[in-house]
Image (tube, rainbow, N blue to C red):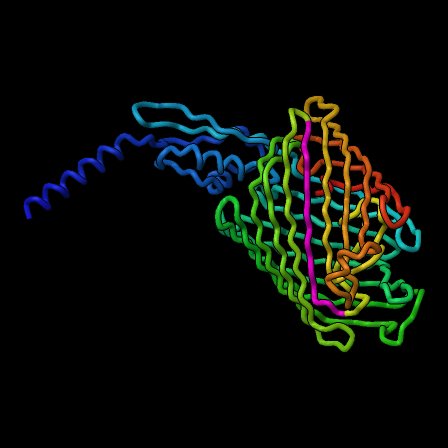
């Protein structure tokens, strides 16, 4: 009994000695904030006052901060106060977060179209996004979006979206295509939970109504001239993010998995399942270069239907191919590009860009062997330029010119906001 008591006493003594020698954080300061509430950043940080000084946690906090829309750059300093007590100072460079957007293009009927929007990515200085858009492409569309990834805690958040989208879209049949007026009115709610600084889960419910009205082109006895469908969508997203940002440069891996189940009650469209996975890899090359890669693999229920979910489109996968050129029930796309900073003056940056986009599709009702069929494989290459403001969130205006290398002579300019991927 006495021996056990002595051993226990020695254990307590050495444990206390080790604890006393640990470096302790006695103060945390945050500098550089102008709009953002300090309490928002304090709640967001994983490191806390009175905790043990841990450089790994500090580095993770910096990496998480750089992913926030309100942050253009961040770093920390550690100061020794006395004995084993330290203070930590986080220096945050804020972005300008009220972002307008303007896009213009021509529709499938060659009409001029435009889309304007405005989003505040740091609403009330609390790291919440709120905004909307208006679109005129011969029809009037709008959307309203709210996103607060850390609304309830530094891990749990909420997003709410409403969209009324109207456009003229082609539907593809065996012997041709037809143009339909398409309308989608949706209401969506999503819960977001951050498991740790690299892993995030999202679960969403979307109630929407689709309407199709025939405009012109091929008709089919199996496809109605008018169709109105109420649908319910269950969405699951898993995000792994290990990217490190330094202004316009990115390095590391990122993976996004999307799973959706859509149910509806009608004779023309069955319930269907769709999933796709995006794998990103970025590599810094020298001081001014950045190699970027994206591999997308997607599959859906293989119905022989013109309503297939995977579109072949300029703004989604292959630059230069055109607008909604085709649809499929499976997709494999690889995008790779080299970005090089050619001018950097203060917060203004111009990047050049050389890219190759390659993709293949499974036709609706087709086989997996469609992916290796030469007629379904398309490869585009081209050059582009980026105009970037380092202190404004997503202030990247891009222009790309792509031309087809295989199975055709398609080519064209692609404009957009933000990097292509």
| Left or right: residue 179 compared with residue 417 | right
Position of residue 234 relative to residue 418, above or below, is below
Position of residue 83 relative to residue 293, above or below, is above
Most common secondary structure along the magenta stretch: strand
Q: Which residue is rendered at x = 87% and y = 67% of the image?
A: 174
Q: Which residue is rendered at x = 66% and y = 37% of the image?
A: 393
Please give the range of residues in magenta: 289-303
| Left or right: residue 352 compared with residue 260 | right
Residue 114 picture location, percent across and down? 84, 47
Residue closest to the far left: 2
Q: Quadrant of the C terminus?
A: top right
Q: Nearer the viewer, residue 370 or 178?
A: 370
Q: Quadrant of residue 74?
A: top right
Q: Nearer the viewer, residue 306 or 388?
A: 306
Q: Which residue is rendered at x = 63% and y = 34% of the image?
A: 283
Q: Quadrant of residue 244?
A: top right
| Number of numbered markers | 0
| Left or right: residue 104 compared with residue 372 | right
**Can residue 180 be found in the magenta stretch?**
no
Residue 37 picture location, percent across and down? 53, 38
**Can residue 290 be found in the magenta stretch?**
yes
Residue 362 picture location, percent across and down? 76, 60
Residue 22 picture location, percent across and down? 30, 32
Position of residue 288 relative to residue 145, above or below, is above
Q: Which residue is rendered at x = 72% and y = 27% of the image?
A: 341
């Amino acid at each position: 009994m006495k021996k056990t008591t002595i051993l226990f006493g020695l254990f307590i003594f050495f444990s206390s000695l080790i604890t006393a020698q640990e470096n302790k954080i006695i103060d945390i300061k945050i500098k550089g904030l102008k709009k953002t509430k300090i309490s928002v950043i304090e709640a967001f940080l994983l490191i806390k006052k009175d905790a043990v000084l841990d450089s790994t946690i500090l580095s993770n906090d910096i990496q998480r901060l750089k992913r926030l829309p309100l942050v253009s750059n961040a770093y920390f300093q550690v100061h020794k106060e006395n004995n084993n007590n330290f203070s930590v100072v986080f220096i945050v460079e804020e972005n300008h977060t009220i972002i307008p957007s303007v896009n213009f293009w021509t529709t499938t009927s060659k009409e001029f179209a435009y889309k304007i929007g405005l989003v505040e990515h740091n609403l009330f200085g609390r790291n919440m996004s709120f905004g909307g858009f208006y679109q005129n492409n011969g029809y009037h569309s709008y959307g309203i979006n709210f996103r607060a990834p850390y609304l309830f805690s530094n891990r749990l958040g909420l997003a709410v979206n409403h969209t009324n989208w109207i456009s003229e879209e082609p539907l593809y049949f065996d012997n041709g295509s037809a143009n339909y007026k398409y309308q989608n009115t949706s209401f969506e709610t999503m819960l977001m939970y951050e498991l740790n600084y690299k892993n995030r889960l999202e679960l969403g419910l979307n109630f929407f109504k689709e309407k199709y009205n025939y405009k012109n082109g091929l008709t089919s006895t199996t496809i109605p001239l008018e169709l109105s469908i109420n649908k319910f969508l269950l969405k699951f997203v898993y995000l792994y993010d290990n990217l490190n940002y330094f202004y316009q440069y990115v390095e590391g891996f990122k993976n996004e998995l999307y799973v959706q189940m859509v149910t509806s009650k009608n004779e023309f469209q069955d319930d269907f399942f769709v999933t796709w996975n995006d794998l990103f890899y970025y590599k810094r090359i020298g001081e001014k270069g950045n190699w970027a890669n994206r591999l997308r693999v997607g599959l859906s229920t293989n119905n022989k239907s013109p309503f297939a979910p995977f579109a072949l489109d300029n703004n989604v996968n292959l630059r230069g191919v055109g607008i909604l050129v085709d649809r499929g029930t499976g997709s494999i796309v690889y995008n790779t590009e080299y970005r090089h900073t050619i001018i950097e003056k203060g917060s203004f940056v111009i990047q050049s860009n050389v890219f190759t986009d390659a993709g293949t599709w499974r036709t609706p009702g087709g086989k997996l062997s469609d992916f290796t069929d030469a007629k379904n494989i398309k490869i585009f290459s081209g050059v582009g330029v980026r105009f970037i403001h380092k202190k404004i969130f997503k202030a990247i205006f891009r222009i790309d010119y792509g031309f087809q290398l295989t199975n055709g002579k398609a080519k064209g300019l692609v404009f957009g906001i933000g990097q292509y991927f």
